[in-house]
Amino acid sequence: MNFSIFVGVGVAAIAARVTFHFIDKNRIQQEIEARGGRVVSIKWNPFARGWFFEKNERHYDVTFVDRSGETIDTTCKTSFFTGVYWAEGPSRVEKPRLASRLHCAKCGYAMNAEWTACPNCGYPVGSG
Ligand SMILES: [Zn+2]
């Protein structure tokens, strides 16, 4: 018995898997950068919904920042010959609004937090 054959096959399978992964990531990154975006993360997703073991294609969860600075969370699939397919329209990630807008207690003018009085009506901040 020559166990090195089995070891060799196993190593080759893993090496192919890793190689594909790098090729795929590179391809997805190029796709995003071609649209003016920037990759945040690309994660292999072997359990993508509805795509399990489908036709040798590989599926990735992708997060990127698009041209306008929005963070996009999406899924794509890719195979060696067919390029990158985006699973669904990119969905925008809701950013939590940290700064809640202040309004003048008298006239409702949108206030900057540093202002001490309303520039519209002169009403002092915090005295309402
Ligand atoms: Zn005011």
Image (cartoon, rainbow, N blue to C red):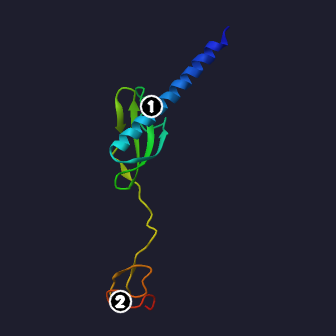
Q: Which of 6 and 35 is in front in this view?
A: 35
User: In the structure shown, which secondary structural element does the residue marked by tag 1 occupy?
Assistant: helix
> Mark 2 packing: few (<14 Cα in 10 Å), some, or many (20+)?
some
The answer to which image quadrant residue 124 occupies is: bottom left
Q: Residue at x 45, y 31 (%)?
A: 23
In terms of image quarters, where does ligand 1 lie?
bottom left
The spot of residue 16 in percent (x, y) is 51, 24
Dot label at residue 23: 1
The answer to which image quadrant residue 11 occupies is: top right
Residue 87 seen from this side: no
Q: Residue at x 33, y 42 (%)?
A: 34
Q: How far apart are marks 2 and 1 (CA)?
A: 61 Å
- Residue contact between numbered discs 2 and 1, judged by CB atoms under 8 Å: no
Task: Tell me the kind of residue under disc 2.
Answer: Lys
Above or below for 106 versus 5:
below
- Foreground mark, 2 or 1? 1
**Quadrant of the rendering where the C terminus is positioned:** bottom left
Q: Which of 87 and 125 is in front in this view?
A: 125
Task: Tell me the kind of residue under disc 1.
Answer: Ile
Q: Would the CB of label 2 be found within 8 Å of ligand 1?
A: yes
Does label 2 or label 1 sit earlier along the sequence? 1
> Mark 1 packing: few (<14 Cα in 10 Å), some, or many (20+)?
some
Q: Would the CB of label 1 be found within 8 Å of ligand 1?
A: no
The spot of residue 51 in percent (x, y) is 42, 34
Q: Name the residue under label 2.
A: 106
Q: Which residue is drawn at 65% across and 14% down?
A: 4
**Quadrant of the rendering where the N terminus is positioned:** top right
The spot of residue 74 in percent (x, y) is 40, 45
Q: Which residue is drawn at 34% across and 55% down?
A: 68
